[in-house]
Structure formats: structure tokens, C-alpha cells
Amino acid sequence: MSSHTTPLTVTLYRLPLTSLPPSLAYPPSLSRIHPSHKLLSLSSLLLKVHLVPNYTLTPPPYKKPVHEDYVFNVSHDQDICCLAVMGINTGMIVGLDVVVHKPLPKHTPTVSHYVSLFTSQIPPLEISWIGSDLTRFYYVWSCREAFFKMIGTGLLGDVLEYDFEFGEIMDEPRVRRGGVVIPCKFFTETSTDTVYIITCCASSFYACPSFSSFLPPPPPPSPTLPPLTFLPITLSPSAILPTYTSLSSSTLVPYDPTSKLSPTLKQSTFHLSLSPTIYLTLNQAYQPDSKGGTSLGFGASVYPCSIVLSLYIFDHLPEEGRFIELGAGPGLVGLVCKVKGWGGGVTDGDEKSCGLARGNLGRVEGGEVKVERYRWGERGGGVFEWLFMSDVVARPYVEAMEDLVKSLEMFFEGNADLKVLFSYQKRGGGEERFWNMCEEKGWKMERIEDWWIRSEWRKEGIEIWRITKS
């Protein structure tokens, strides 16, 4: 059996869904790979790159893409490659394994003899349950590997410490460790002629020690597990063909647009991991209108431009600084600055947005950051080294560009060395007016190198620009 395990992590915004550079992806020792394995690797990549965005990337009005944080697991065997995806906002993790039913290897006299070769991975009680039934063996193997991939250890962990209890039929097993039941749910798909067995295992982040050490307090337990997205892909000698039809078994819950895999824009909370020890949670307050926000058009949810700018600030700017942010929305950028220990101010033109940001900033410790209502063009003051903006140089706000430039001019007057950083995504025209007005002021505008930005966001045209007073 050939399978591929993707390490699970909550640092999901740093995981590119593309391959490594050729110099890293294909070292000399791996340059001679069987063509069938290359096809499986390619199919795995296609699943992640082309199918996952169908469920995690939704373009609402004005082309603001909404990215859903997610965990996923991939498995393949022979000509079958599968992907399981779950939204991270569910608080769940997922493991997946596919096993193609194969005949006994040559020189292996009986099924019992073959099964006895796996006593280092399968405990005696399960060996006894398998007996001489090869299908049971593949089912046990599929369940165990899906579970160990879910918790992140793979088959290299202490697999014999976990006991899987099966009934008389191949029903859902119960998993125990040291006599304690581990809460998890198994979903199984088996072809009618038992050519393959596919098993998904899902559980809570908080049931896995690898994650629970740096996660926020667990939410109230849910009576039911959220749906899984299960997407198969089939291979042929001449082509790789994605299949969007659902599997025959009803035990695997198909994708549901109302599930937790729906766009994060409309969800009540947003999560972002800055490091293995810093995990941020923000409340959101999406209200639909013609501008994608509330009646005043403010961003009450976190958009990708804000995420990109926040990661740049956290990773690439100094450990100390003073800042002001314009158009803060729910306050992600200000929250990251506060976690870094910076001081400054977060502003937005709507008091409801300011209240949302105050609540989000008030839940973390760090630098002193105030939240105030401020509309572009109004007189403002203060001593700052940095001014941040995300997703405000955008089509919905083109009519306010003059006021925005007026605000920048006033802040430059009081802070000669002020540096303005803003994240931007072109969405349909009108934004060039901002560049023209800045150039008329004689300001220097530079685009920040984007080598560190996740490839999908580069493809979407998300950029960071710096403005300084020449």
C-alpha cells in the first residue's frame, strides 16, 4: 500500500497548496520515481489545488475572496486517490486512508500467516478478530491508519497502546487507550465488490495532545460531528480525471453549503495562528449590503488582504513600534500589533465596527492599543512610525479616495518619517485614482516583494505597498 500523509497544523495560512521549488522537491536520490507514483502524487496535488478552493474559496460581491481555514488529509493506493477536508472552525481534525483489496502475496500460504506479519502494528485481540478474513484485515488496517494519521503520529507512534474494538460485523470501531475511550467518529466507504475500503476518522482538536497545548479553551461539546467533504479522484493511463459525483455509501456525509465549510466571512468567529504558541480568535459581525459589509460598508469580517498584511507585520517588522490603522474592521491588524507589544491606535468610521474591534483587542494582552472612531478626511493627530490599511483601496470606497489621501497627508505632516503599509487587491477599476493622487503629492510608492506570500494569494493579485514622503 502506498499512502501519503499531510501533517496537520493550525498554521494553515502558511501552508502553500503547491509543490516545493524543483531544487527542493526532487533531490537526486528521489529523481527516479515510478511513473505510477508520480501520477498519484500529481493527483494528490490536483485535489488540494483545484478541488479544495471550491469549498474554501468563495467570491462574494466585488470579488473579495473568502478563505475558509481547514484541515485536510490525503491517501492513495494503486489507482485511487482521496481527500478529506474539514473546516478548522469546527474544531475538528481528520484522518483518511484508502486500501485496495489485493490477493495474498506470493509465497504466503494462508491469510492467518500473512496477518501474523503485522503484529508490531495490530494488537492480539484484533488479530484474533481478523482470523482468516482478508477483508477484515484491510478494514482494520484502514481504520487504524486513518486514526493515527488524524492524531498526527502515523504508524511510527505507539500504535499498540490503542485498542480498536470491533463487533461481529465490520461496524464502526471503538478506540481505547489505557481503557479510556477516545471520542472519534469513523466513516467508511466500501465498493460493492470490495475492491477498495476508504475510511475517514474525525475527532476534536482537543482530543489530540499535539494540538491542545496551544489552542484556546474548548467550545461546548457538539451533539453531532460536522459534515465531511469527501472528494475522490480516479486515474487512467492517459489522463487524470476529477470526479464530482458523490460516493454510493450514505455513511459518508456529502458536502453541505450550510456546513462549517461555508465561507468564513459570514461566520461569527475567525481564527488565525501566528505561531505554534500564538492563536488568535476574532468575533465577526457580517451584515450583507451592496458593499459587502454593513449599511456603512465597513468590513465587519476578516478578508485575505488583512491576513496577508497581518502576517507581514508579525514576521517582518521590528519588535517595537507605534502604529495607527485606518479602516480596521474587526481589528485583526491591530490585534497582531498588540500581540507584538506595539502601541498605537485602531480606527474605523463606524462605531459598531469600533465596538467589534474593542472586544477583540480586549481579550489579549500586549501593547497599549486604543480604538477610536475616525472618518477619512477628519483632522487626526498622534506620533506614529507606521500607518496600516488593508483592503481600503478598493472599488467600494473609490468615492472616498480624496478623503483617504487627505488623511494620509495630515498624518505625514505630524510624522515626517511615517511609513504607510497597505495591502491591496485589484477588483475591477477605479483604484488607480489612489495611485495618481499619491504621485501628485510627490510621495514615493513601492511594492513589497511577494516571495513570502502564499501562492494562491499571489495568483489572486494580493499585494503590499509602502508609501513614504519623498
Image (cartoon, rainbow, N blue to C red):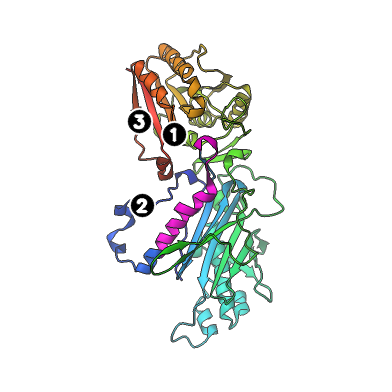
Residue at which label 2 appears: 20
Q: Which mark is residue 287?
A: none
Report the span colored magenta: 40-64
Q: Main secondary structure of the magenta part?
A: helix
Please identify the quadrant where the C terminus is shown.
Answer: top left
In this view of the protein, can residue 156 be seen by the observer? no
Are the residues flagged by discs 2 and 1 in contact, CB closer than 8 Å? no
Q: Is residue 60 magenta?
A: yes
Query: Which type of secondary structure does the marked residue at label 1 adopt?
Result: strand
Density class for disc 3 (Cα within 10 Å; few <14, some 14-19, many ≥20) is: few
Can you say whether 332 is above or below 401 in the image?
Answer: below
Residue at the spot 50% in from the left edge and 14% down from the top edge: 377
Of the numbered discs 2 and 3, the one sitting upstream in the chain is: 2
Of the numbered discs 3 and 1, the one sitting upstream in the chain is: 1
Residue at which label 3 appears: 447
Query: Which type of secondary structure does the marked residue at label 2 adopt?
Result: loop
Q: Position of residue 438 (x, y in %)?
A: 38, 19
Q: Is residue 71 magenta?
A: no
Q: Position of residue 136 (x, y in %)?
A: 59, 76
Separation of disc 2 and disc 1 at Cα? 25 Å
In this view of the protein, can residue 268 be seen by the observer? yes
